[in-house]
Amino acid sequence: MQKRLTIRWLLRAIVCAALCLCATVFAAAREETRTDELLSQVRVPHVLGSGTFTYGGQTFNRLLVPRYVIEQFENSAFAVEPEQCDDRVTAIKKYLNSNDNFPYNEYVTYTQIRPPYAEGESREWIETYFDDHLAIFLQTVYRFCGLEDKQPVIDELTCYLLECLPNVSQNMSWDIESAYKYELIQQGKQGTVGRDGTLDNIYYFAQTDPDWGGEEFQFFKVEGNPQYPNGVTIKDRGCGCACASMVFSTYHMVEITPRITARYADAGNWHVSYGLPNEYFEGIAKFYRDFEKDRYGTTLQLPEILEKDEFTIGELESWLRDDRYMAIIHVGPGAFTSQEHYMVLEDYREIDGKGYFLVADPYVQPSRYKDTDQMLAVEGSTNEGLIYATPELIYRDCMAIVLFRQSREAFPLTCKTAAPESGWLS
């Protein structure tokens, strides 16, 4: 028995429980029309435009959808637009996030459907919100179907096109996903989606996030008795795991949460009393080096561990600003913490003529900061884990950096399919 429920079934069920829009029921319920006659006669679909298109300097093959099928959905019974909240958005997100339909694709990410922070906060809000990532994904699907001029909207045609996706080859799925992730970078909208639906255009994960912050950090063993954990959590000692998550997610363009990177720490058996050592990042970078090579062709270059006396603050500024590198900074007690701590240096920018590093602090508690006269809040962001800090402050507290010498915006764009494909439903 086919377990997959179509999106149309999910959406129509919300509007009227009596209507079932599974593909087979939808076909059976139609009256005999000229469209049905054409559908039974046509083998090769007549589509808009050619069988290929060019995007980002790369030639891609189309996902072929018959013209008559497109025309039959011109007058949709419903339409949900970006930035709206609607239960039909929830149905779309859960469908695209399904491991049954899309086991090798990240069409919808964890942060687009994750639960709320606070108890009592509406869990459904982020699920129901038509966010920018979903809008760009729909635009990508339209592009593959020859509908470049169609604006992102959840309507009957969009639902039909999404229902077609499980019928295409894995290579076509990867082509669609690769073009989607590339477009996120081009529009400056890559990264995680905040619980309020906003984007900071970076991948950010907090060790204090309640989704995993309370989980026991298994790597942390009692000294003298390494067989048993001592009860500390990811929130207590997981800054290194959260930083690895942010960096690796950026270079591979998928969401790798601290829960996942903490498992590697456990497997690596890092027996230290304060948290993870700098060498942890070398080890886990090797593990994640080719994490998405088959899928996207991305490769994580191994980092360099540089002690404070091995680089200048000017070099660090240039690496982030000009070369677009990323770095994890190991700081000692000072402006950010009363003990040792890891944070991510996301960028270097000038604000009102003065330079600042954009710092992603995985421990969200700004009240603990000192020397705030050398810090700036990130305007327009609701993420309290992000802060601007002066070069003087960064260099003063720095003990070492873990430098990734590759552009955080480099993302290969290749076509894996050999010919156009027909994934349309009858």
Image (tube, rainbow, N blue to C red):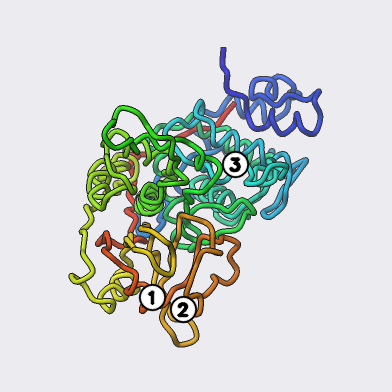
- For image coordinates 40% across by 47% down, the residue present is 237
> Is 119 placed above or below 28 here?
below
Label 3 is placed on what type of residue? Answer: Ile
Label 2 is placed on what type of residue? Answer: Gln
Q: Is residue 272 left or right of residue 23?
A: left
Label 1 is placed on what type of residue? Answer: Leu
Q: Pick whichever of labels 3 and 2 is earlier in the sequence.
A: 3
Tell me the element at label 1: helix
- Residue 38 x/y as whole percent: 62, 29
Q: Are marks 2 and 1 in contact (CB under 8 Å)?
A: yes
3D distance between C-alphas at marks 3 and 1 = 37 Å
- For image coordinates 54% across by 38% down, the residue present is 65
- Residue 393's tag is 1
Are there few (<14), some (14-19), or many (20+) residues within 10 Å of tag 3? many
> Is 339 placed above or below 48 here?
below
What residue is disc 2 on?
A: 374
- Residue 209 x/y as whole percent: 53, 47
